[in-house]
Image (cartoon, helix red, strand yellow):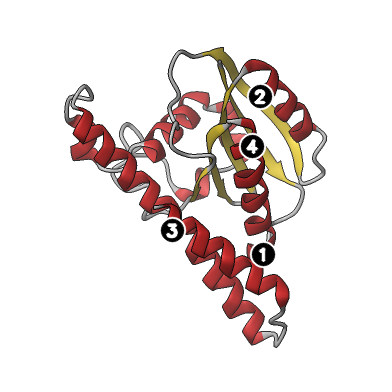
Amino acid sequence: MIQISYVSSSAQPMPTSELLDLLQQCLTNNAARDVTGMLLYGNATFLQTLEGEAGVIDALYEKILNDPRHTQIKCLYRKPIEQRRYADWTMGFKHVSEESLHNAAGMTDFSQRDFTYDYLTEHESVADNLMTHYAYWDPLVRAVDERDQRIKQLEKTLASAHGQVDVASLVLESLLQAEGEDSLGEHHERLCRLALETLKKG
């Protein structure tokens, strides 16, 4: 089993609807391939970690390299792992914001505006800290001995809930935009179903 982490630029700023389509694709495909991971997005920048069987992850990363939605793709690391960091998530997601960065360990000088391809490729340790920060939300829970299985479960539940809220928020934002443009359609009904399925999984 391996874990890959990469950073890339979005070919163009991604509207909410396209970001939701990407997440839906990840959730569906990753579940079928036993792939888990986390995706962070902000400032037209992707930071993603994927984990699973080596052949599956390498093939998936090759597809990402040829995905026209990405440019300037850089692999930060590829390493063998014995245990998954994101075992409960076919694809965790977080839209990076100042609020969500609050109390991030060892990142007092990092802000939302620094979440860019150039900054992350020049500061790979920051990228790793970000993935760790969004994997474990509550600093009080993080500090507790991880051997306590009940605390581990609470930790995962909290993180999963945050990810579900972000997906639902994206759907609501998309609906509001469409309503303002008088363009509500079947596509938005599908997005609502995605949000509902995501929340039910919690």
Q: Residues within 10 Å of mark 4 (few under 14, many from 20)?
A: few
The residue closer to the viewer here, 114 or 178, is 178
Residue 73 falls in image quadrant? top right
Give the quarter of the figure containing the N terminus: top right
Mark nearer the viewer, 4 or 2:
4
Q: Residues within 10 Å of mark 2 (few under 14, many from 20)?
A: many
Amino acid type at image mark 1: Ser
Q: Position of residue 41 (x, y in %)?
A: 57, 48
**How far separated are the C-alphas under marks 4 and 1?**
23 Å
**How far separated are the C-alphas under marks 1 and 3?**
21 Å
Q: Earlier in the sequence, mark 1 or mark 2?
A: 1
Mark nearer the viewer, 1 or 2:
2
Q: Residues within 10 Å of mark 3 (few under 14, many from 20)?
A: few
Q: Earlier in the sequence, mark 4 or mark 1?
A: 1
Residue hosting label 2: 57
In the shown orientation, is residue 89 left or right of residue 179?
Answer: left
Q: Earlier in the sequence, mark 4 or mark 3?
A: 4
Amino acid type at image mark 4: Ala
**How far separated are the C-alphas under marks 3 and 2?**
27 Å
The relative height of residue 72 versus residue 75 in the rendered view (above or below) is: below
